[in-house]
Amino acid sequence: MPKNKTAYTEVAVTDFINNLEDQQQQADSLSLIRLMKKVSKEEPRMFGATIIGFGQYQYKYASGHAGEAPLLGFSPRKAAISLYVFTGAEEHQHLLENLGKYKIGKACIYVKKLADINEDVLVKLMQATINYVSEKYTRIKL
């Protein structure tokens, strides 16, 4: 089984944030760190070169593919902030109602800036994701 390329690193989250060129992304990143830390009760850590992750779990799909991933996370990218806070499961689609202005991939939500979305709805999304992942997969204590 091939090993996942992306894993937690020892790079300091503050160094990563301080090196962002966009002031809005820096401010939004600091706000997301506070929010995700509060909801997950986990410390932020760099997952790969550009993802700030909170907590960790092991997954294994029916296909046999397995790996480890953060419970929650985000990545401040040039075009948008990628939020890893959504399961993508059909039973969680209703949680996207009233979220605000966003685009979505399979299980990743893209926002231009944090002010475009409803923080209360984001918190509900994060809590539902943590509950789902905790029931379905094995959490790892960091």
Image (tube, rainbow, N blue to C red):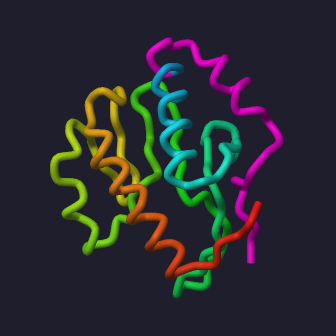
User: Hey, which quadrant is residue 88 in on the image?
Assistant: bottom left
The magenta region covers 1-25
Which residue is rendered at x = 54% and y = 84% of the image?
63
Above or below, 88 against 105 in this view is below
Which residue is rendered at x = 43% and y = 64% of the image?
129
Q: Nearer the viewer, residue 11 or 37?
A: 37
Which percent across, then down, holds residue 139?
65, 72
> Is residue 18 found left or right of 125 in the rendered image?
right
Above or below, 62 against 114 in this view is below
Disc tally is 0
Q: Which of 6 and 109 is in front in this view?
A: 109
Which percent across, then down, holds residue 50?
62, 37
Q: Is residue 125 magenta?
A: no
Above or below, 111 against 60 in this view is above
Which residue is rendered at x = 74% and y = 51% of the image?
8
Q: Which residue lies furthest to the right in this view?
A: 10
Which percent across, then down, holds residue 87?
40, 65
Which residue is rendered at x = 61% and y = 84% of the image?
64
> Is residue 92 found left or right of 36 in the rendered image?
left
Say which quadrant the N terminus sits in: bottom right
Say which quadrant the C terminus sits in: bottom right
User: Hey, which quadrant is residue 71 in on the image?
Assistant: bottom right
- The secondary structure that dominates the magenta segment is loop
User: Hey, which quadrant is residue 126 in on the image?
Assistant: bottom left
> Is residue 57 found left or right of 89 in the rendered image?
right
Which percent across, then down, holds residue 85?
43, 54
